[in-house]
Image (spheres, grey):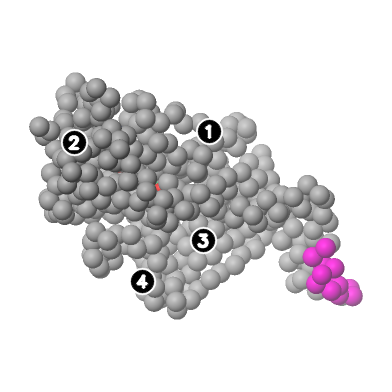
Amino acid sequence: MSEFDAIVVGAGPAGASAAIRLASSKKNVLLVEKSDPPGSKNVSGGVLWGNGLSAIIPDWEKSAPVERFVDTKSVAFLTQDSKIGIDFSSKKLEQKKTGYTVLRARLDQWLARKAKEAGAMVINGITVEKLHIENGKVTGIEQDGDVITSDTVILCEGANPRVAINSGLRKPLTDHDVAIGVKEVIKLPENTINERFHLKSGAGFACEYVLGYLKGGVEAGGFLYTNKDSISVGIVVSMSHLRKNDATHTYDMIEEFTAHPYIAPLLQGGEMQEYSAHMVQEGGFSSIPKLYGNGYMIAGDSAGFSFSNGLVLQGMNYAIDSGIAAADTFAAAYDKKNFTENALKSYQDRLEGSYVMKDMRSFKGIGDVTWSPFVHKKIPAMLESLMMGLFMEEGRPKKHMTRMLLDALSQNDMLRVSSLMDAYRMMRRM
Ligand SMILES: Cc1cc2nc3c(=O)[nH]c(=O)nc-3n(C[C@H](O)[C@H](O)[C@H](O)COP(=O)(O)OP(=O)(O)OC[C@H]3O[C@@H](n4cnc5c(N)ncnc54)[C@H](O)[C@@H]3O)c2cc1C
């Protein structure tokens, strides 16, 4: 007889969601988290996209510690001197409210509290070392020689899934599987943020940047999101690109970003409240491990569920929905008292039927195009040339727009066959 029906490792969005779902259906569940309090070391940009939490916490937006709903979503290309952006502000974003800025230290503590209220036992400050395996079946967790047993373990340990790797459930990560995110939280008065970003109270701004000007030519993305009385600003750089430019440091990159002439004024007068760095799951479809086996399932970042196409960075939504899918799979297995690989196989089916696996399949290999010099160098430079042509008045005869576009493309070497192939590959994958 096991001590718990299920043990969930990690109280991020995936683990907390799984524990809430399990406890709500009266399962005896243990949620183990290494940080104390939960979320104190977790990092997201972060915009929580989607509405997955409503399946486990009705009207969650009313009680969750969300900062602002996103009513202006932007994407911008930065060169040394310019910013070329697209802003989307809409009453529709306000009505539907599909994105909320969040701070993980607050969100994760609230989620863990919800798991406790639902009936889960939550233990903080314990790092699970490995899985306890007997006769080929996972029967619990081990820490410091102690074993706690359960019928099933759900692994939700995030982007650095050491327990899964140490237990032979997934291959060690490669540079291709991860990016590094570095983030600052800059404190500013709520009114200053509202005025600076033209926001009404409660509304938020979220922008992803393509950084086409960093020293050493390293390719990186930037983000800037408004919280109630702070701004989250940071960069994400793929591990393999960072390794290729080993003279480049992430702390220099975030400084170059925050010092940009069109970013610095947005942060002016602010005080740094937090500085953090974290791994980002980037491997996409090819890095997804086997998601279930005898007595275990893997959810969230540990399973490789994260998505970035340069316009958005998402992972919390996949974490929540995969955590819930794992919990539902456990509940079905519990009714039959069968926790074998065969019984837990329906976890894969649940995910395949949801947007989680559909997105992972549809955007297979997207990292190969979004981290390319084509996106990070040629497009920003070409857009800058085009905008200069369109908007500079120098007392010379004007060109037609098609001519200007062709000139901008040709000045930036984008009419070559190789560039046209890059553009085609990008359009196909995105
Ligand atoms: C810089 C950055 C920006 C991002 N921006 C966004 C964004 O804007 N929107 C978005 O949706 N996503 C964003 N993401 C991705 C998002 O943060 C992740 O996809 C999401 O956190 C995954 O949730 P998770 O529960 O799977 O893992 P995590 O949130 O990482 O949670 C894992 C938990 O497990 C715990 N843990 C780990 N190992 C153990 C162990 N051995 N024993 C006990 N506990 C353990 C950890 O402490 C942690 O609390 C961003 C990520 C980064 C780094």
x and y percentages locating residue 117 in the rendered image:
13, 54
- Report how far apart the C-alphas of labels 1 and 4 lie in the structure: 39 Å
Q: Which mark's residue is nearer the viewer, 1 or 2?
A: 2
User: Based on the displayed image, in which of its 4 quarters is residue 296 positioned?
Assistant: top left
Note whether ligand 1 is within 8 Å of mark 2.
no
- Report how far apart the C-alphas of labels 2 and 4 lie in the structure: 44 Å
- Report how far apart the C-alphas of labels 3 and 4 lie in the structure: 17 Å
- Report how far apart the C-alphas of labels 1 and 3 lie in the structure: 26 Å
Q: Which residue is pictured at 61% across the width and 44% down the height?
A: 368
Q: Badge 2 is on which residue? A: 151
x and y percentages locating residue 146 in the rendered image:
16, 24
Dot 1 or dot 2: first in sequence order is 2
Note whether ligand 1 is within 8 Å of mark 4.
no
Dot 3 or dot 4: first in sequence order is 4
Q: Which residue is pictured at 57% across the width and 35% down the height?
A: 240
Dot 2 or dot 3: first in sequence order is 2
**Disc sitting over residue 207 in the figure:** 3
Q: Amino acid at mark 1?
A: Asp
Q: Amino acid at mark 3?
A: Cys
Q: Badge 1 is on which residue? A: 175
Label 1, secondary structure: give it.
Answer: helix
Range drawn in magenta: 396-406
Q: Badge 4 is on which residue? A: 202
User: Based on the displayed image, in which of its 4 quarters is residue 98 positioned?
Assistant: bottom left
Q: Which mark's residue is nearer the viewer, 2 or 3?
A: 2
